[in-house]
Image: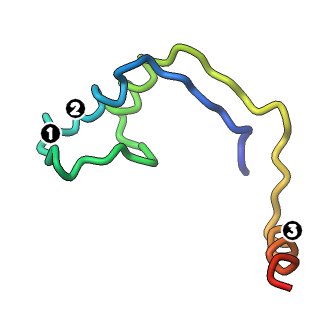
Amino acid sequence: SIEPLEIRVVQRGTFEKLMEYAISRGASINQYMAPRCITFAPILELLDSRVVSSHFSPAPLHWSPTRRHKQIHKLIN
């Protein structure tokens, strides 16, 4: 199931710290891009430690494969 959307605002400089961490582990500074999906525990801990506010979507999610197919079908036709 899909949980409600959560947006976490982090301290200024957090993504620079993230880049520094990646470079310290051998990433190339020229090839570095901020990750879109994070599962590595040390990076999650870094991000969690720098959260200044958290916001949840007030609306419940309504998604189903059938509904999406109908929406796409309407766009095409």
Secondary structure at numbered mark 1: loop
Badge 1, how many Cα within 10 Å: few under 14, some, many 20+?
few
Q: Residue at x 41, y 31 (%)?
A: 44
Going from the N terminus, do you reach mark 3 or mark 1 first? 1
Rendered location of residue 67, percent (x, y): 87, 68
Locate the C terminus and report the quarter of the image it occupies. bottom right
**Is residue 54 left or right of 68 when viewed as pictured?**
left
Query: Could you say which quadrant of the image residue 66 lies in?
Result: bottom right
The residue type indicated by label 2 comes to Tyr
Q: Is residue 11 above or below residue 74?
A: above
Q: Which mark is residue 25?
A: 1
The image position of residue 14, as x and y in percent, is: 36, 24
Q: Residues within 10 Å of mark 3 (few under 14, many from 20)?
A: few
Secondary structure found at label 2: helix
Residue 53's spot in the image, x, y percent? 59, 16
Residue named by callout 2? 21
Mark 2–mark 1 CB contact (< 8 Å)? yes
Report which residue position mark 3 lands on.
67
Q: Distance between the residues labelled 3 and 1?
A: 44 Å
- Which SS class for mark 3? helix
List the single residue furthest toward the top: 52
Please name the residue shown 24% across and 47% down the image: 32
Q: Nearer the viewer, residue 25 or 14?
A: 14
Name the residue at 54% across, 23% down. Answer: 9
How far is the residue under mark 2 from the one under mark 1?
6 Å
Task: Name which residue type carries label 1.
Answer: Arg
C-alpha separation, residue under disc 3 versus residue under disc 2: 42 Å
Q: In this orientation, which residue lies closer to the viewer: 45 or 29?
A: 29
Residue 42 is left or right of residue 74, and the answer is left
Query: Which badge, 3 or 2, comes first in the chain's sequence?
Result: 2
